[in-house]
Amino acid sequence: MYVKLVSIFIVAIFGVCLGEFVETPDKLYFASKEALNWTEAKKACEEAGLELVSLLNENDKAVLESFLKEYKLAPQDAWTGYWLAGIRHPDGKFYWDTTGTKVGEGLSDWLVGEPSNAYFKEHCIELKQGFNQMGWNDYFCVEARKYLCQVPRAEGPRGEGLRDYSFLAEENRLNERPSYRVPMPFDNGIIYLDASEIFNVKPF
């Protein structure tokens, strides 16, 4: 019944069901068919009453991968993937945007050689196909990817919410602090640039 009601809700929002669902003990997962940049994907999930997927443990990973394979939705090559909720904080570490917890605390599923932070601008996490396995890759937030949303069945610990964790948040008071100016190597020294200039992503 829960799956049916949520499916109807998604159809009402988008006018058509844009993906598939799977129910777990505490979540529903939704896979999109459209490709958006990370910020747009986050908004699309939220406008449907959902949120981008965060993978906190091995069970989350196993259930999600089983769902993607069962419905033939898994990434087919190294050039396609799904946005997840992970985003790099100006302290250099990745956090799950939906919970504020550090990526890797309960589960670390990076592909070999990742995160690579190419050109110092790969700051969002996608789930993609590696060699014989799916895993995480850091990628340019402005690029278009399909995305994975989830519906929490029960409200979990979320701290004070997104604005305390995401430097992209438009009204984040922490953006005014020096820690949100990121050191970058330049010639033989260091220069400090505003995070929004480096990450090249518009605020929410």
Image: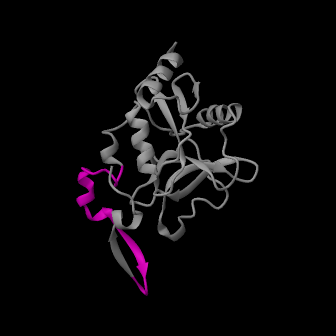
* Name of the residue lying farthest toward the bottom: 188
Left of 21 or right of it: where is 163?
left
Name the residue at 47% across, 21% down.
Answer: 6
* Name of the residue lying farthest toward the front: 15
Q: Decide: is 25 above or below 81.
A: above
Percent of width and height locating residue 22: 59, 26
Name the residue at 38% across, 60% down.
Answer: 90
Left of 84 or right of it: where is 160?
left
Name the residue at 52% across, 26% down.
Answer: 27
How many numbered circles does the render carry? 0
190 or 38, nearer to the observer: 38
Percent of width and height locating residue 158: 37, 36
Name the residue at 47% across, 53% down.
Answer: 94
Q: Is residue 150 visible?
A: yes
| Residue 174 within the magenta-colored segment of the rendering | yes
Magenta segment boundaries in residue numbering: 166-189
| Residue 94 within the magenta-colored segment of the rendering | no
Left of 179 or right of it: where is 57?
right
* Name of the residue lying farthest toward the right: 132
Q: Is residue 99 visible?
A: no
Q: Decide: is 120 above or below 126.
A: below
Percent of width and height locating residue 13: 41, 29
Percent of width and height locating residue 74: 67, 41
Residue 73 position by quadrant: top right
Q: How is the image coloured?
A: one colour
